[in-house]
Image (cartoon, rainbow, N blue to C red):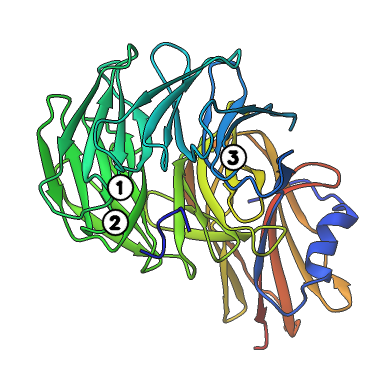
């Protein structure tokens, strides 16, 4: 498999039927819902990998098995461009300082460039069978890339001049790469179990531990965040090398991106879920509509949503930057609800109680403005009578019947 994974008060309103149905179909469970949209690629079994926002207001992505570069508008219209080289296997993709899209061709051992008009240029990587994978724009106007088998970090100017820098750790298998807030490039070493840093002068430093780190991104807190595929953790590393790990995912976290809501978002390759983690470590997982999707890499789009690739499902997905970070407990007649809420658009914040017979009482509903970064707060409802088992649901909606995201839990109110 290519992806290298083996080696407060508010106005009372009636909530729409769709909102109530989310709980009605999942009674006696805790769960989450996000309004995820999926767009199949025109080419079947295309195995899309890297994805990035382009300078033209669209998203651009690489199709590993189809040897194509794809473009998708925020409305979901897809165009594909075949690469000049067959069996090129494009994977990582990034926007260059020249306004073109640059991508890494793994089996072909090349770095490719495509203009927004669809014109290609390809440049060979000096190390034969180096397997270039991740790619990112550097602060020096060049593109920087990883060579998974070549054990190098590469640099290519927009004129096509390539320089390679060997990584000190043998067989480190560098994968993801991202520009950091300190003017350096940071990368993951899947084989070495380390996070690397390379200055634009070529000096490399390495930090550990990290268990099979895969993707990496700059966070809103001036740190770097990365996925640990083998251990189900999300890692955070400061620019001085201090590492914190959060065990958040059950199934193979893979891609990661900073969201417009001020949280970090990640994919779960085998778990068919989209995850969200705040910079304080509060995590939530949202299931994708289909199983076996093989969710891969992710980016923030120009429309304020998170866009991701489905390697197994050959689709492009869109997930709203919406999270509640919700949990609830009940004791001594008081219902305590904790939130870590973030959303980058205006919405209506709802709380609903429900039992198998239907809604209980009048729902809480309040219009809110964007909440960026996520805010932690607690709601307490006192003197709650014995209602037996109830489901407490929190939801953010955009309008009648338009659920953006929702989280719920079932608990007992027995006194």
Q: Secondary structure at mark 3?
A: strand
From the viewer's perspective, tell me whether residue 254 is left or right of residue 205.
Answer: right
Instruction: Give the alpha-carbon distance from disc 1 to disc 3, as whole Å.
Output: 25 Å
* Residues packed near mark 3 inside 10 Å, few (<14), some (14 to 19) or many (20 plus): many
Instruction: Give the alpha-carbon distance from disc 2 to disc 3, as whole Å.
Output: 24 Å
Kindly identify which numbered label has been placed on residue 148: 1
Q: Nearer the viewer, residue 410 or 113?
A: 113
Q: Secondary structure at mark 2?
A: loop
Instruction: Give the alpha-carbon distance from disc 1 to disc 2, as whole Å.
Output: 9 Å
Please provide percent x and percent y for residue 41: 70, 40
The image quadrant where one finds the C terminus is bottom right
Please provide percent x and percent y for residue 106: 41, 41
Residue 107 sits in quarter? top left
Residue 362 in view in this figure: no
Vertical placement of residue 290 versus 114, above or below = below
* Residue at 83% across, 66% down: 361
* Residue at 38% across, 57% down: 281
Mark 1 or mark 2: name the one nearer the start of the chain: 1
Vertical placement of residue 68 versus 277, above or below = above
Q: Which residue is mark 2?
A: 190
Residue 202 in view in this figure: yes
Q: Which residue is mark 3?
A: 307
Q: Nearer the viewer, residue 96 or 385?
A: 96
Are discs 1 and 2 less than 8 Å apart at CB? yes
Residue 270 sits in quarter? bottom right
Mark 2 or mark 3: name the one nearer the start of the chain: 2
Q: Nearer the viewer, mark 1 or mark 3?
A: 1
Q: Residue furthest bottom?
A: 415
Please provide percent x and percent y for residue 230: 37, 67
* Residue at 58% across, 26% down: 302
Q: Nearer the viewer, mark 1 or mark 2?
A: 1
Are discs 1 and 3 less than 8 Å apart at CB? no
């Amino acid at each position: 498999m290519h992806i290298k994974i083996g080696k407060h008060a508010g106005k009372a309103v009636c909530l729409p039927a769709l909102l109530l149905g989310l709980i009605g179909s999942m009674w006696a469970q805790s769960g989450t819902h996000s309004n995820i949209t999926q767009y199949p690629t025109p080419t079947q079994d295309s195995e899309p990998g890297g994805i990035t926002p382009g300078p033209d207001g669209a998203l651009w992505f690489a199709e590993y098995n189809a040897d194509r570069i794809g473009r998708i508008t925020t409305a979901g219209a897809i165009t594909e461009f075949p690469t000049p080289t067959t069996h090129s296997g494009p994977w990582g993709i990034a926007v260059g300082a020249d306004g073109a899209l640059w991508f890494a061709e793994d089996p072909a051992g090349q770095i490719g460039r495509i203009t927004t008009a669809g014109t290609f240029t390809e440049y060979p990587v000096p190390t034969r069978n180096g397997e270039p994978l991740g790619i990112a724009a550097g602060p020096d106007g060049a593109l920087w890339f990883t060579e998974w088998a070549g054990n190098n970090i590469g640099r290519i100017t927009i004129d096509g001049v390539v320089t390679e820098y060997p990584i000190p750790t043998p067989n480190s298998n560098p994968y993801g790469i991202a520009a950091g807030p300190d003017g350096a490039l940071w990368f993951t070493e899947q084989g070495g179990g380390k996070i690397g840093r390379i200055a634009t002068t070529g000096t490399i430093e390495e930090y550990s531990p990290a268990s099979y780190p895969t993707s990496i991104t700059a966070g809103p807190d001036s740190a770097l965040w990365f996925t640990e595929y083998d251990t189900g953790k999300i890692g955070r590393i400061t620019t001085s090398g201090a590492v914190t790990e959060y065990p958040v995912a059950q199934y193979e976290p893979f891609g990661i991106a900073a969201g417009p809501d001020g949280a970090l978002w990640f994919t779960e390759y085998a778990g068919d879920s989209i995850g969200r983690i705040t910079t304080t470590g509060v995590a939530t997982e949202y299931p994708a509509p289909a199983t076996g999707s093989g969710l891969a890499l992710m980016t923030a789009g120009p429309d304020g949503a998170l866009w991701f690739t489905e390697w197994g499902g050959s689709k492009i997905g869109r997930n709203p930057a919406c999270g509640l970070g919700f949990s609830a407990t009940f004791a001594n007649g008081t219902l305590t609800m904790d939130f870590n809420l973030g959303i980058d658009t205006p919405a209506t914040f709802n709380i609903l109680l429900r039992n198998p017979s239907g809604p209980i009482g009048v729902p809480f509903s309040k219009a809110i403005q964007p909440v960026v970064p996520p805010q932690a707060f607690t709601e307490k409802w006192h003197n709650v009578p014995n209602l037996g088992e109830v489901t407490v649901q929190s939801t953010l909606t955009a309008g009648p019947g338009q659920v953006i995201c929702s989280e719920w839990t079932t608990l007992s109110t027995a006194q």
